[in-house]
Image: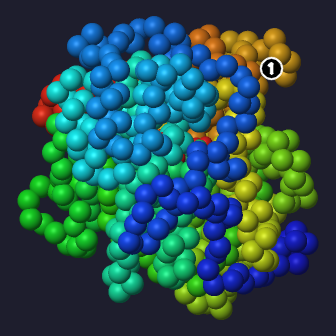
Amino acid sequence: MSSRRLSLALRRARLPSARPAARPIVSIPSPTSSTTSSISARPFTASSTVAADSTRQIKYTSDAYPNIKRNPNFAQVTAEDVRFFQELLGAPSAVVDGVTSDNAADDIEPFNSDWMRKYRGHTRLVLKPKDKDEISAVLRYCNEKKLAVVPQGGNTGLVGGSVPVFDEIVINTSRMNQIRSFDEASGVLVADAGVILEVADQYLAEREHLFPLDLGAKGSCHLGGNVATNAGGLRLLRYGSLHGSVLGVEAVLADGTVVDALSTLRKNNTGYDLKQLFIGAEGTLGIITGVAVQCPPRPKAVNVAYFGLESYDQVRAAFREAKGQLSEILSAFELMDGRSQRLVHESTGNKYPLEGEYPFYCLVETSGSNGEHDLAKLEAFLEHILGEGIVADGVLAQDETQFQAIWRWREGITEALSHLGGTYKYDVSIPLTDLYQLVDDTRDRLTSLGLVGEDDSYPVRAVVGYGHMGDSNLHLNVAVRQYSKEVEKAIEPWVYEWIAQRNGSISAEHGLGVAKKEFIGYSQNETNLKLMKQLKALYDPNGIMNPYKYI
Ligand code: FAD
Ligand code: MLT
Ligand code: ZN
């Protein structure tokens, strides 16, 4: 089949050298003065990451999960504690006090509830230290007084890890927002934990570099939160995991000890690699205060294509071909099922990129340094997969606007789902052969239980699948009219058993938080769990760091 049989919209294009930030960055003046590059944080409500139905009441986690009991060893915050923190941190904006003030409820609520509007805590105190020394003094005090804490970055986490369950003090990193240094020769960025991902990437774009992580919540999430969750995102396929690109971490332990493992070296085999422990620990071992990250040069030529496919087998075939033919320039291979794209269509009103509707779609991105060479490769790939009938139709972005528009069909799914009421999210790794089968099996199961339907008498609206095909990472999402125990029990632990039977992981990139704490045994054996618990006890003997979560 020749390229003449492609959709009319499929034409070649070359994009501008640096892909601008996907969304405009609104900077507000930093509350701290700085002699280094001043990078300002913005409030949680970045346009891209506002969970939609903000009028709906969120149930307290302690009511939704009554099996979780408050640890009686923890103290309750007193007025004396608040005075200590106010004196320590100084700036009025550094303490949001609902302990001695009755008027702080509205100010505290955004720190108590999560992006999915599924988890809600009872904290009455939020602290915003400005540097590692303040974090150290706060934690030393909390540890002595047995006050439990929750580290919080941009609060975009999807497993309930970033908000309290009971009255834990929130320690938010939004005032720690300075880029400390950037070395253009090595590409190493050193930054405070509270720098917003998109702000860091914009800073790097101006220096022809790129942050090696990109995700839909980039306008709100913090680098510290990214490292604490070991976030994966849209280009892990190309740039690898943060376990590889994070060169150093500065963190504070529960007793106030500052761990300076902020190496900027690519190679450093002197002893245990302590920084790795904090990557993906979700704030249970300490608070990350600074990170050193290896950042690659920004690719000069970036292309994105979007395909419709008739079956999951064809998606797998397209991925195989993309790896083989695009090899070193392949930077993303994302899977979206037809239902997920319909949800984006319904929530945005945007016209579909292709003329027909298909059961599967994929998005392929290339990033390279030579536009001509990349286009030649991409064109050959497109002709091949169309000619072989692997994909049914496709479109290639012709300019920056189309590039952004195509990515929105993928990045917009999470937000589109958030408009529907609630979402049970399962973020899992499964060998590619079986990956999409989980979505079909879940839909069949919930349908046979009479839970799925079009009208309001059914709790489930849709069962959709999408994800990072290139990383064998599926996002199974069950969209409900409202969170319901009946649906939750129909899915869990069945879904975890399904994954364990195929040697998958129940947590690919979002983490464990509250959502998966009790299911960790489906992906970790007894010996590993024992070692993890020993580490936790060593680093945090009083268990004050992000309790009721993770392990
Ligand atoms: P938070 O949500 O504030 O915290 C997350 C966890 O890290 C909590 O357990 C918290 O206690 C801990 N933590 C936060 N800061 C620190 C710190 N400084 N030190 C120690 N612990 C800390 N995730 C992906 O992996 N890939 C995606 O593609 C992706 N896309 C998303 C798209 C949307 C629209 C949304 C809303 C979320 C998405 N996420 C994704 C999830 C989320 O954005 C990531 O987990 C992100 O890394 C969280 O960063 P944060 O600053 O918001 O952290
Ligand atoms: C994504 O890949 O879009 C994110 O991980 C968020 C989600 O799973 O919805
Ligand atoms: Zn993801």
> Relative to the observer, which residue lies in front, 108 or 231?
108
Residue 88: percent from left, percent from top: 29, 41
Q: Considering only vertical position in the picture, is 19 above or below 535?
A: below
- Can residue 366 be seen in the rendering of this structure? yes
Label 1: element kind? loop
Residue, x 85% and y 41% (percent of image)? 346
In this rendering, would 58 be left or right of 38? Answer: right
In this rendering, would 263 be left or right of 377? Answer: left
State the quadrant of the N terminus.
Answer: bottom right
Residue 239: percent from left, percent from top: 44, 67
Q: Considering only vertical position in the picture, is 45 above or below 521?
A: below
**Ligand 2 appears in which quadrant?**
top right
Identify the residue position indicated by label 1 in the image. 453
Q: How many numbered markers are drawn? A: 1
Q: How is the image coloured?
A: rainbow
> Relative to the observer, which residue lies in front, 118 or 327?
118
The three-letter code of the residue at mark 1 reads Gly
> Relative to the observer, which residue lies in front, 481 or 396?
481
Residue 68: percent from left, percent from top: 39, 12
- Can residue 497 be seen in the rendering of this structure? no
Residue 257: percent from left, percent from top: 15, 45
In this rendering, would 452 be left or right of 429? Answer: right
State the quadrant of the C terminus.
Answer: top left
Which of the 4 image quarters holds residue 460?
A: top right
Residue, x 32% and y 53% (percent of image)? 131
> Relative to the observer, which residue lies in front, 315 or 292?
292
Confirm if mark 1 falls within 8 A of ligand 2: no
Which of the 4 image quarters holds residue 171?
A: top left
In this rendering, would 466 be left or right of 123? Answer: right
Packing grade of label 1 (10 A; few <14, some 14-19, many >=20) is some
Residue, x 35% and y 69% (percent of image)? 180
Residue, x 59% and y 16% (percent of image)? 59
